[in-house]
Amino acid sequence: MSTTFGSRLPSQYDDNYCFFIHDFLPGDSLIVKDGHNNRVRAIVDSVDNKRMMIQYRTKEGKSDFATLNEIIFLSFQEKGWLE
């Protein structure tokens, strides 16, 4: 699916149009693919609307960024998500 802007601007959606950048809020629970293609549970720390990236934190306290295409699952804040 092509857009009017082509590749000049980062997309507010992932490639499959499942996630929209404004779907994400700090504290939300998610599963993300890490740099080794492993699925990792994490919590959203912040959302970078300009670069279309999500900053997240894992159980081990590691903080990293993910693009929308690296997000596998998103849910509202769930108690005990990282336990």
Image (cartoon, rainbow, N blue to C red):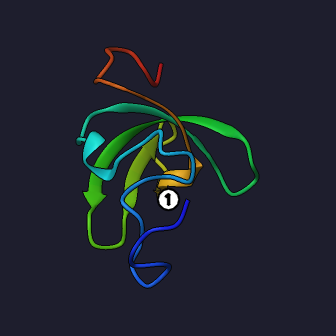
Q: In the picture, residue 49 is in which quadrant?
A: bottom left
Q: For numbered disc 1, what is the local secondary structure?
A: strand
Of 33 and 63, nearer the camera is 33
Q: Is residue 21 above or below residue 60?
A: below
> In the visual, does 56 lie left or right of 69?
left
Say which residue appears at 69% left-offset and 57% top-offset.
Answer: 35
Of 33 and 61, nearer the camera is 33
Residue 48 horizontal/vertical position (percent): 29, 64
> In the visual, does 22 lie left or right of 82?
left
Q: In the picture, residue 33 is in which quadrant?
A: top right
Q: Tally the marks.
A: 1
Say which residue appears at 50% left-offset and 52% top-offset.
Answer: 14
Residue 61 horizontal/vertical position (percent): 45, 45
Of 24 and 79, nearer the camera is 24
> In the visual, does 70 lie left or right of 42?
right
Say which residue appears at 47% left-offset and 39% top-offset.
Answer: 18
Residue 45 horizontal/vertical position (percent): 30, 48
Q: Is residue 53 above or below residue 33?
A: below
Graded by Cα atoms within 10 Å as few (under 14), some (14 to 19) or many (20 or more), the crowding at tag 1 reads some
> In the visual, does 27 lie left or right of 55?
left
Q: Is residue 50 above or below residue 66?
A: below
Residue 16 horizontal/vertical position (percent): 56, 45
Say which residue appears at 28% left-offset and 56% top-offset.
Answer: 47
Amino acid residing under circle 1: Thr
Q: Is residue 34 above or below residue 79?
A: below
Q: Residue furthest bottom?
A: 8
What residue is shown with label 1? 67
The N terminus is located in which quarter? bottom right
